[in-house]
Image (spheres, rainbow, N blue to C red):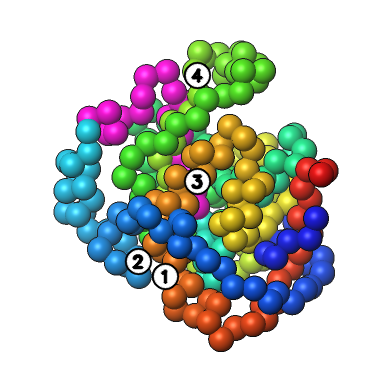
C-alpha cells in the first residue's frame, strides 16, 4: 500500500513522492488540550493542578487490575506523529509506550521510555492528557504476557504525553539507548488518520482518544498553513501494512 506520509527504515531514506492533498483534522479537535493555547509549550503548574482537582478520583490513579503505563505522542515540526512497527508482531505499528515504575513521576517515565525505545532525547514537553486511558490485553495474549511479567493484569492504563521533536532525524535510533531489547524495526512520521489505520485493534480506541485530546494542537498546524497554499509536500514512503 502506498502512503501519504513519511517513513525511514533505520535512518535510511527509501523513496520520494509528491503529495497533492489537504488534511482535515477537524474530527480530532473535539477535546481541548490541557492548556489555554495550542501554541503553549508547557502548562503552568497551577493550571495542571486546577484541572486535576476537577477530575473524579477514579481519573487520578489507574483503575484496579491495570498496569501503570505511559504513552508518547511525539510530533515533528510538521505535526506528524512518530510511529514504529514492532519486530515481533508483523504489520503492527504503534506510538512509543512503556511501563512506569512504582513511584516514578509519569512525565519522567515517558521521557525514559522514549529514550529507551527510540534513542530520542531532544523532545520538548507540550501537553499531558488529563485522564487515564485503558485497553485490555487480547485474550489469546493475556496469559502469556502475565506469565512473562509474573502478574495478573487485565490490561494497561496509560497516561499520554505530547512531545515535540526538536532534534535531527539522525538522532532517532531504534536500538534505543542500549538499556533494553529493541522493540521496533521501522519508523515513520504519519498523519493522525494513518496512525489510526495502522493501530492494532485492542489499542485503536485508546488512539482515537489520544487524537481527540491532542487534536487542537494538530489542528493548529493545519490552520497555520500546513495545507493552505501548499499543494505539494515531499515525503519518504515505505510503510508495510497487513495484506489486503
Q: Residue at the spot x=33%, y=56% of the render?
A: 33
Q: Nearer the viewer, residue 94 or 103?
A: 94
Residue tagged 2: 38
User: How far apart are the alpha carbons under marks 1 and 3?
Assistant: 18 Å
Q: Position of residue 53 (x, y in %)?
A: 17, 41
Residue tagged 4: 154
* Tag 2–tag 1 contact (CB < 8 Å): yes
Between discs 2 and 1, the one toward the N terminus: 2
Residue 58 within the magenta-colored segment of the rendering: yes
Q: Which residues are magenta?
A: 57-73
Q: Residue at the spot x=78%, y=43% of the render?
A: 242
User: How far apart are the alpha carbons under marks 4 and 2?
Assistant: 35 Å
Residue tagged 1: 220
Instruction: Tell me the mark number nearer the camera, choosing from 4 and 3.
Output: 3
Q: Is residue 177 visible?
A: no
Between discs 4 and 1, the one toward the N terminus: 4
Residue tagged 3: 208
User: How far apart are the alpha carbons under marks 4 and 1?
Assistant: 36 Å
Residue 237 lies, with reference to residue 71, above or below; the image says below
Amino acid at each position: 500500500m502506498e502512503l501519504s506520509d513519511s517513513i525511514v527504515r533505520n535512518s535510511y531514506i527509501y523513496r520520494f513522492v509528491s503529495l497533492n492533498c489537504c488534511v482535515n483534522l477537524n474530527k480530532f479537535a473535539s477535546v481541548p488540550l490541557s492548556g489555554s493555547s495550542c501554541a503553549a509549550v508547557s502548562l503552568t503548574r497551577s493550571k495542571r493542578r486546577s484541572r486535576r482537582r476537577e477530575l473524579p478520583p477514579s481519573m487520578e490513579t489507574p483503575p484496579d487490575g491495570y498496569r501503570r503505563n505511559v504513552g508518547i505522542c511525539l510530533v515533528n515540526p510538521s505535526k506528524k506523529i512518530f510511529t514504529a512497527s514492532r519486530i515481533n508482531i508483523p504489520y503492527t505499528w504503534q506510538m512509543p509506550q512503556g511501563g512506569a515504575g512504582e513511584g516514578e513521576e509519569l512525565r519522567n517515565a515517558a521521557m525514559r521510555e522514549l529514550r529507551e525505545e527510540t534513542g530520542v532525547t531532544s523532545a520538548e514537553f507540550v501537553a499531558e492528557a488529563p485522564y487515564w486511558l485503558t485497553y485490555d490485553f487480547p485474550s489469546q495474549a493475556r496469559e502469556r504476557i502475565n506469565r512473562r511479567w509474573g502478574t495478573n493484569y487485565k490490561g494497561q492504563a496509560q497516561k499520554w504525553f505530547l512531545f515535540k521533536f526538536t532534534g535531527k532525524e539522525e538522532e532517532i535510533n531504534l536500538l534505543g539507548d542500549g538499556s533494553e531489547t529493541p522493540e521496533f524495526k521501522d519508523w515513520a512520521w504519519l498523519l493522525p488518520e494513518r496512525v489510526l489505520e495502522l493501530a492494532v485493534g485492542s489499542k485503536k480506541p485508546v488512539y482515537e482518544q489520544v487524537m481527540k485530546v491532542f487534536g487542537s494542537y494538530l489542528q493548529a498546524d493545519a490552520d497555520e498553513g500546513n495545507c493552505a497554499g501548499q499543494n505539494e509536500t515531499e515525503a519518504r514512503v515505505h510503510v508495510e501494512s497487513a495484506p489486503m
